[in-house]
Amino acid sequence: LTQHYPQSGWVEHDAGEIWTKTLECAQDVIPKAGGAACIAGIGITNQRETVVACDTATGVPLTRASVWQDRRTEPFCAQLREAGHEATVQARTGLLLDPYFSGTKMRWMLDTVPEVQAAADAGTLAFGTVESWLAYKLTGGPNEGSAHITDASNASRTLLMGLEDAQFSEELCKLFGVPMEALPRVTDMSGALAQTDAALFGRAIPITGLVGDQQAATIGQACLAPGQTKATYGTGAFVLT
């Protein structure tokens, strides 16, 4: 993917490019697997905290995606810390107030990108991380019946969902100023989550997995029983059990 660095500390991706390259890759590989009839299911993994904003009326991104590395929301995080919110947020979510996570990126888009606020006012704004964006487009978005979904491994990295929550938290969304109605529905990581638009690949293919990168690595490294643990060393070091 093209990396965009508009200024120091800012990192962006083009969500349209993510979709186009994903679709081209799928259309290239499916015939090599014997055709869509031979595909039992689609799994999507992603770097978790990157935020996409799109208009559900058009299915088009409203601004570039703000990548997990982006640091532009540090002033907002500092403001929340100074107001004494960090301890409560950490107790609810397990996360510190940091630009890394998705919620502050969503607030920044609402505050600074007029098209994002206009879509929110019109009730057509959809916020999500990359798996939400790809699931939405794969299921035919903006067509009626498309799926705007996320899984718990991605939703838990937004600052908008508590550790005990099954869906996004109204209280946390209010704190960060993010409209709940713009967020995807939280699902399990696996199961019959959605189906692709039949027009894309010649038949509908089930989407059966959505999972963030570190959780995907845990599955890929065959940690499938309670207590099994993996460590990944990459950009950072991560231990998951």
Image (spheres, rainbow, N blue to C red):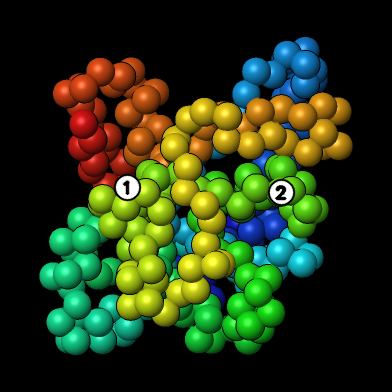
Instruction: Give the residue pinned by disc 2.
Output: 146
Which of these two is toward me, 87 or 145? 145
In the image, what residue occupies the spot 65% across and 18% down? 40
Asked which secondary structure carries label 2, the reply is: loop
In the image, what residue occupies the spot 41% across and 53% down? 167
- Image-quadrant location for residue 195: top right
User: In the rendered view of the protein, which quadrant contains the C terminus?
Assistant: top left
Instruction: Name the side, left or right, on which 77 lies relative to 81.
Output: right
Name which of mark 1 and mark 2 comes first in the sequence.
Answer: 2
Q: Tell me residue 127's x, y (percent).
A: 55, 64
In the image, what residue occupies the spot 41% across and 49% down? 154
Which of these two is toward me, 195 or 76? 195
Is residue 225 visible in the rendered structure shown here?
Answer: yes
- Image-quadrant location for residue 25: top right
Q: Tell me residue 193's x, y (percent).
A: 57, 35
Asked which secondary structure carries label 1, the reply is: loop
Instruction: Give the residue pinned by disc 1.
Output: 235
Tag count = 2
Q: Residues within 10 Å of mark 2 (few under 14, many from 20)?
A: some
Is residue 47 visible in the rendered structure shown here?
Answer: no
Instruction: Name the side, left or right, on which 152 lies relative to 142.
Output: left
Q: Tell me residue 210's x, y (percent).
A: 50, 38
Calculate the distance from the C-alpha at mark 1 to the C-alpha at mark 2.
34 Å
Residue 229 sits above or below residue 52 on the image: above
Amino acid, disc 1: Thr
Numbered badge on residue 54: none
